[in-house]
Amino acid sequence: MQSSPFNLRRAIVWIGRLVLAGIFIYAGYSKIFLPIVHPHPPIGVALSFFAMQVDSYQLLPPRGVNFVAHTLPFAEVALGLLLLIGWRLRIWATIVTLIMLGFFAAVVRSYALGLQINCGCFATPEPLTIKTVFRDGALAALALLMTIFAFIDARKPHPWSSPEKA
Amino acid sequence: MIRRQILALTVAGTLFGLCCVLLAAAGLPQSTGAVSDVDPHTAFGSKNAPVTMEIFSDFQCPACKTLFTATNGKLMDNYVNMGKVYLIHRDFPLPLHAYSRIAARYSRAAAQIGKFEPVEQALFQNQEKWEQNGDVDGTVAGALSAAEMTKVRALVKGGTLDAAIDKDYALGQMYRVNQTPTTVFHCKGQTYPYPGVMSYDILKQFLDQLLSQR
């Protein structure tokens, strides 16, 4: 029996791809180009500004802070585009999920420690509050579901694909 | 399959574009280049320095103390005193702190007799003590001579200091400051608001990047 092309699992994969891709691309873009600052600063200034936000989490030594600050924004844009395109979806979905879980763990830790810091998620200054914790948790859950369902779906022939010849 | 991917890209691209426009439109107030309403007694360094830093601070806030003790000393030595950064202290006493405004009044009074630095240091270094018993007066007295303290007390009693504190607070609200410390960097007409503590090494990189802009 062939499954319907419109089921909940497939819908969640699509929603996850669109939502997370949009968020990842905008998050990376805003860190690289700082759209809230006019006139726009050079990329080096924007990335060193982001480094201060990474540092405020008090998780990494200065070298680690610099590595994350100079690679994460580009990785976010690339992963967002790869999610949209859908090529080798399971690989990129897994990586996005791991990153989202990492963000969620960092945010929960900072909130639990009472650190009064900026989220650093986008370019706008945004204090890390319980709202941030819930938002990151919801996005991490969406990423996880999208990845699990993408793996499940990959085991089955797509309902729109032509039937296999005997 | 390809058609579906093109459709997804188009939809997401449109959504992304809309988000960018909306978020950019909701940006922060832009700097006009010059920083206004600066009390010269609570500002350090050269007015003509290429970078200006306004620190919105609350004397009773532990994170402000951390910024002051861990970062400000090196910042003063390597950037402010070298003419690279103009550092401005802005009062932003949070209503949830019982003695913040009183401490701000004493520091403003001390600033008027040219003693802001020792009083700022005394208030931050003894924060745990006076926030328990509210003895701001005693803490400030420990950093000044008897004659200076008499002048400071007279200024505090005069009741004229709140206007300057309120001015700083209103300026902070214009920058959408909602936590302390918040540092607003100005360079080449650009404004960078940064809430939170900064470690010196990472702040140094940012300042060097700002200073290397052509």
Image (tube, rainbow, N blue to C red):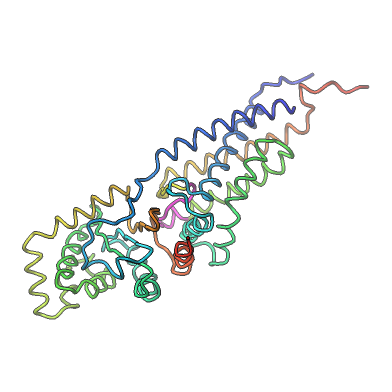
Exactly how many numbered labels are in the figure? Answer: 0
The answer to whether residue A116 is magenta is: yes
Magenta-colored segment: predominant secondary structure: loop
Report the residue at 34% width, 54% height from top. B33
Q: Residue furthest front?
A: B214
> Could you say where residue B102 lies in the image, as x and y percent from the top left?
17, 62
Report the residue at 26% width, 63% height from top. B59
> Could you say where residue B106 lies in the image, as x and y percent from the top left?
16, 66
Q: State the residue in front, B102 or A49.
A: A49
> Could you say where residue A49 lies in the image, as x and y percent from the top left?
47, 57
Image-based side of A83 in relation to B39, left or right: right
> Could you say where residue B159 lies in the image, as x and y percent from the top left?
8, 59
Image-based side of A98 in relation to B154, left or right: right
Image-based side of B30 in relation to B165, left or right: right
Report the residue at 54% width, 35% height from top. B16
Q: State the residue in front, B185 or A26.
A: B185
Q: Residue furthest right?
A: A166
Quarter of the rendering occupied by the N terminus of chain B: top right
Image-based side of A156 in relation to B94, left or right: right
Instruction: Report the magenta residues as a range.
Output: A110-122
The answer to whether residue A149 is magenta is: no
